[in-house]
Amino acid sequence: MLPDVALTDRPPIHGPLDWVGMQHIDLPLTLDEPGCLPTVAASADAQVDLTDPRIKGIHMSRLYRLLDEAAGQVVTPRAIAHLLAQMVESHADCRSRHARLHLRFSLLCRRPALVTQGLSGWKAYPVELKAQWQGGALRLRASVQVGYSSTCPCSAALSRQVVEQAFIQQFGQHAALAPAEVAAWLRTHASTATPHSQRSVARIEVGVAPYADTLGLMALIERVETALGTPLQTAVKRADEQAFARLNGEHLMYVEDAARKVSQALQTHYSGVEVFVSHRESLHPHDAVAWAGQG
């Protein structure tokens, strides 16, 4: 029989440890999210506690094998709770009582164009799941990252003023104008000044109900995109680009507006909502940021 010094040897320094385990384990995960690929490449961290100061170490291979076995099952809150309970049970000889799991992956989803029928493309949404098993109960939180476009309200107002001044300079002496004349002028000069927009990102973390049947990641993402109104697009034609420009004009927002929109849209549907938004400024070499729900 091969020696197992983790069991037979005593640690030279006695002391309890909060968590012991592994980080950045590569594995495939199976998901059930509408419009998304069912299998993703993931990175996992898995640990248990080691409170008995006389025990030298845990059994890393036991955690690894449990993760490997779980990789073939659809990831749900129930499945995560079962895995964490198994992690604790597998270390009964180490007197472990708690376990935790951290999963990182990206949902790869097919998203339709705004206007053009039959046109779509792939978009990745980074996701993290943080689970902890303590006292026989599961605590599970999910975070998603959602990209969107933001157009500055102040910049839009200033741009409209430039167009207004140009119009007055051109037609200020006219008592009346035919609609066709105004339309012709606007077609050429309405973009005399344009408001600045930027690709922006919202990172949202929420509590997930233990023992729920699904993670509900796409439902969360779609609530966020609906609240913001300007989700990033994949494949586009000119009609889709025009529709996207219209959406930006209808949803002018500061970073404060974005954080409040998302927070309000999620509060009645999720527990422990935390929101972070970042507008990667096209005007400045720095970003505008806002947080909500983080105390």
Image (cartoon, helix red, strand yellow):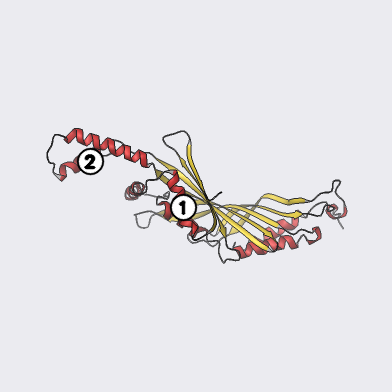
Mark 1: give few (<14), some (14-19) or many (20+) Cα within 10 Å.
many
Furthest-left residue in this view: 175
Image position, residue 128 (x, y; %): 58, 52
Q: Which residue lies at the image location 24% right of the left edge and 37% below the top edge?
A: 164
Relative to 260, 165 lies left or right = left
Q: Callout 1, which amino acid?
A: Val
In this rendering, the answer to whether 175 lies above or below 220 is above
Q: Quadrant of residue 97?
A: bottom right
Q: Secondary structure at mark 2?
A: helix
Q: Quadrant of residue 209?
A: bottom right
Q: Which residue lies at the image location 68% right of the left edge and 56% below the top edge?
A: 100
- Regarding residue 36, the answer to whether it shows in the image is no
Image position, residue 35 (x, y; %): 47, 60
Relative to 69, 243 lies left or right = left
Of residues 43 and 278, which is closer to you in this image?
278
Q: Callout 2, which amino acid?
A: Leu
- Regarding residue 252, the answer to whether it shows in the image is yes
In front: label 2 or label 1? 1
Q: Secondary structure at mark 1?
A: helix
Mark 2: give few (<14), some (14-19) or many (20+) Cα within 10 Å.
some
Q: Are marks 2 and 1 in contact (CB under 8 Å)?
A: no
| Residue position for label 1 | 262
Of residues 41 and 176, which is closer to you in this image?
176
| Residue position for label 2 | 186
Relative to 263, 161 lies left or right = left
